[in-house]
Every structure is written in C-alpha cells, then in structure tokens.
Image (cartoon, coloured by chain):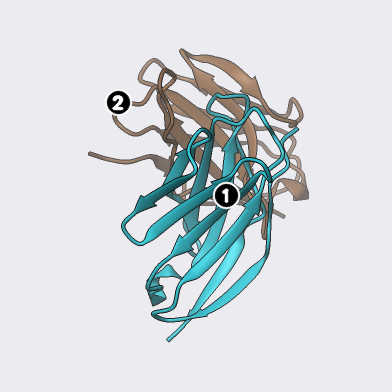
Chain colours: A cyan, B brown
Amino acid sequence: GEDVEQSLFLSVREGDSSVINCTYTDSSSTYLYWYKQEPGAGLQLLTYIFSNMDMKQDQRLTVLLNKKDKHLSLRIADTQTGDSAIYFCAEAYYGNNRLAFGKGNQVVVIP
Amino acid sequence: DAGVTQSPTHLIKTRGQQVTLRCSPKSGHDTVSWYQQALGQGPQFIFQYYEEEERQRGNFPDRFSGHQFPNYSSELNVNALLLGDSALYLCASSLWDGGDEQFFGPGTRLTVL
C-alpha cells in the first residue's frame, strides 16, 4: 500500500547542507518526487527520480534512492534562507499520476 | 505560459452548504487531479479526471464530486459540508501519456464554520 514516512523538523545554518529523508513502502512505485511548500502556498515541484535510478543531481539538489531499503533523500547544498519551507516526498501510485505524500519535513534556515 | 490556476483563493462556508472549486491546468496538460491538504498534513488524493471522466478515486465519500470540461479545466464540488472538510484544496495538472511531472496550483483555502 501507499505509506510514505518523513521526519518532521530540521534546523540548519545558512550555507550548510540540509538532508531530508523519506521512506516509502510501495514496491510498484515508478517515480519519486520532492515538492516544496512555502507558507500559504501550493506545492512547487523541485525534482523527481525514476525508480530505476540511484541518484539525480540538479544544481544544488541531490536525490539519492536506496531501493533495497526503500529510502529516499534530498540534499540541499549551500542552504539559503529562501529554502525555509516544508518539503514533501511523494511516490507515484501504481505507475500512474496518483501521488501518495508523506507528512512533510519542515526546514528552518538560520541566518 | 500560465501555470495551474485555481479559484477562489479563499472561501468560507457553513456546515451543510455546498461548494464548487475551480482549476485550470497548465497549458498543454490534459489531466487534472484534486488533493485535500488538512492543516499539518500531506496532501491526500481525492480523484483524477481525464477526457472528462473520473479515472481514479481516493478514499473520499460521494459528497465529493467533480467534473472536467472539454478545455481540460475542472471543478471540485463538495456537498453537505462538514467542519472536517476545512482544508487547502490543491489541483494538479499533468499529461495522461508520459505524465511524469505534476504541477500544482496555489490552492483554495476552504473554511467550514
């Protein structure tokens, strides 16, 4: 079934790296996504990875996928104050466009 | 190129009333999905529309219904509103074929009193 878990809160100093973790349980997932949500706003698609990949890098963002442990992580290099937000991981359900989300991880960047 | 748009931005209703929320997908997208995000939670899938038909449905009661128009825009209707329906309602658009990217609108904040 769809059961995505995330840790809840992360505090990081500006300029440091942030790592957000997520575990998923649905072995039939095809895509795994990271979304960013700022206060009062909708979801912004940051990046996504296909489930046959191990890693994807996109500018300051690095996504790592451990299929054996069903563990997904997002690393943000050189974290900026504008990175303060809630980050959601999500998985595509049964290979279609239905997304199952975790509860989110709030990242607070300290200047 | 406009992204996903939703209206209204905010809405206040009372218990028992009915509400209609609207969504226009990103240009070129043909599939619209609706999600409910309660405070402090991740979004939950309500249903998805493609070619004017409901294609998938999450675990939501029949009070939640929808519609898709020939121009791909969509409406979400909720009847007999309950206090627990208060949430941010998000619309996501994508392509039915090869739709690996889903883009979300800003959402409609519904408050039921």
Residue for badge 1: A89
- Closer-to-camera residue (A8/A50): A50
The residue drawn where x is 67% and y is 60% is: B40
Position in image of residue B28 (x %, y %): 30, 25
Query: In this rendering, would B84 be left or right of A100?
Result: right
Identity of the residue drawn at 46% across and 40% down = A49
> What secondary structure is found at the residue carrying circle 2?
loop
* Coordinates of residue A15 in the picture (x, y in percent): 39, 79
Type of amino acid under label 1: Cys
Quadrant of the rendered structure where residue B64 is? top right
Residue A79 in sight from this viewpoint? yes
Say if B46 sits above or below B112 in the image: above
Q: Amino acid at mark 2?
A: Gly
- Answer few, some or many: residues within 10 Å of disc 2's Cα (few below 14, many 20 plus, some between 14 and 19): few
Task: Say which quadrant the N terminus of chain A sits in.
Answer: top right
How dense is the environment of label 1, judged by Cα within 10 Å: few (below 14), some, or many (20 and up)? Answer: many
Mark 1 falls within which chain? A
Q: Would you place residue A52 above or below residue A86 in this image?
A: above
Residue indicated by mark 2 = B28
2 and 1 marks in contact (CB < 8 Å): no
Residue placed at 38% from the left, 32% from the top? B25
Question: What separation in Å lies between label 2 and label 1 (alpha carbons)?
Answer: 25 Å
